Image: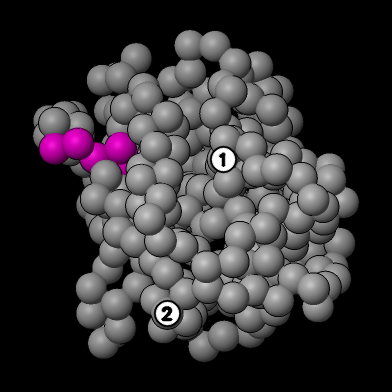
């Protein structure tokens, strides 16, 4: 499903459009990317997200985003679909390794969103929330609360990306893309689709200067820590007391298991 970029979708700061002349919904699309190397943790995260919902979620849908050489766990897809409307997409990009594999998988999310939005096959989501396998939600109401945070930061100015602000990483500020909101503005998505080629660094860091000019925002309730060690139950409780809603960067199961134990 290659991106077919429309010239009429040329995006400028402050311009909002939802594509196909459809009004934007109040829903977000939670994107769960994975490859075989992190599939087990991805499955655990997806099931936790489903279990945190008391009933079918009206605030968000789920996209299972598989790398070209991976397949979704069908039992988990069925499990999650009891609580969410679910989409599945297998990325056509064939990059592997860092940063190309991560960049290519993110490009797959953008391709899916752009093409499906243009054809009217998905709702006019107000935003995408990228949740890599090393993310951990830390509240039963994390979806509602983060959706409201997106509304808050984008209410008074145009914001194309929002999330955990990382200052001066490699002499460049950026919003970490592993746990970030992207605007659902189809013109912005079309612009982004043309930028996600082969890069020498992660897409979030590489495009940070352009995101900054176009509009970005820190969401303090989203935390990202690179190469984070596992978290004990008390450390998870402290993060919850601090008000963290989504934590990114822990590549161990202990934090997920402790979050499940505390929240459920």
Give residue 172's position: percent from left, percent from top. Answer: 30, 83
In this rendering, the answer to whether 99 lies above or below 228 is: below
Write the residue at 68% across / 66% down: 187
Quarter of the image that includes the N terminus: bottom right
- Magenta span of residues: 242-248
Circle 1 packing at 10 Å, graded few (<14), some (14-19), many (20+), is many
Earlier along the polypeptide chain: callout 2 or callout 1?
Answer: 1
Residue 257 is drawn in which quadrant?
top left
Write the residue at 59% across / 75% down: 12
Which residue has dot 1 on it?
A: 28
Asked if the residues shown at circle 2 and circle 1 are in contact, with their CB atoms under 8 angstroms apart, the answer is no
Write the residue at 37% across / 24% down: 141
Write the residue at 56% across / 40% down: 28
Residue 228 is drawn in which quadrant?
bottom left
Quarter of the image that includes the C terminus: top left
Which residue has dot 2 on it?
A: 213
* Callout 2: SS: helix
141 sits left or right of 15 in the view: left
Total labels drawn: 2
Circle 2 packing at 10 Å, graded few (<14), some (14-19), many (20+), is few
Circle nearer the viewer, 2 or 1: 2
């Amino acid at each position: 499903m290659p991106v077919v970029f429309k010239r009429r979708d040329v995006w400028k700061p402050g311009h909002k459009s939802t594509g196909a002349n459809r009004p934007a919904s109040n829903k977000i699309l939670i994107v769960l990317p994975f490859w075989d190397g992190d599939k087990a943790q991805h499955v655990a995260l997806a099931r936790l997200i489903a279990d945190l919902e008391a009933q079918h979620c009206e605030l968000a849908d789920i996209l299972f985003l598989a790398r070209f050489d991976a397949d979704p766990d069908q039992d988990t897809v069925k499990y999650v679909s009891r609580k969410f409307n679910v989409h599945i997409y297998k990325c056509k990009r064939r990059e592997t390794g860092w940063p190309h594999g991560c960049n290519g998988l993110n490009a797959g999310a953008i391709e899916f969103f752009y093409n499906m939005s243009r054809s009217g096959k998905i709702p006019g989501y107000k935003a995408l929330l990228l949740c890599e396998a090393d993310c951990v939600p830390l509240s039963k109401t994390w979806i509602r609360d983060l959706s409201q945070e997106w509304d808050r930061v984008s209410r008074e100015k145009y914001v194309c990306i929002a999330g955990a602000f990382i200052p001066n990483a490699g002499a460049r500020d950026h919003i970490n893309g592993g746990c970030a909101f992207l605007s659902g503005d189809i013109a912005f998505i079309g612009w982004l689709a043309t930028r996600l080629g082969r890069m020498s660094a992660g897409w979030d860091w590489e495009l940070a200067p352009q995101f900054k000019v176009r509009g970005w925002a820190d969401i303090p309730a989203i935390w990202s820590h690179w190469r984070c060690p596992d978290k004990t139950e008390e450390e998870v409780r402290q993060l919850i007391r601090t008000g963290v809603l989504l934590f990114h960067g822990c590549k161990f199961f202990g934090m997920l298991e402790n979050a499940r134990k505390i929240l459920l």
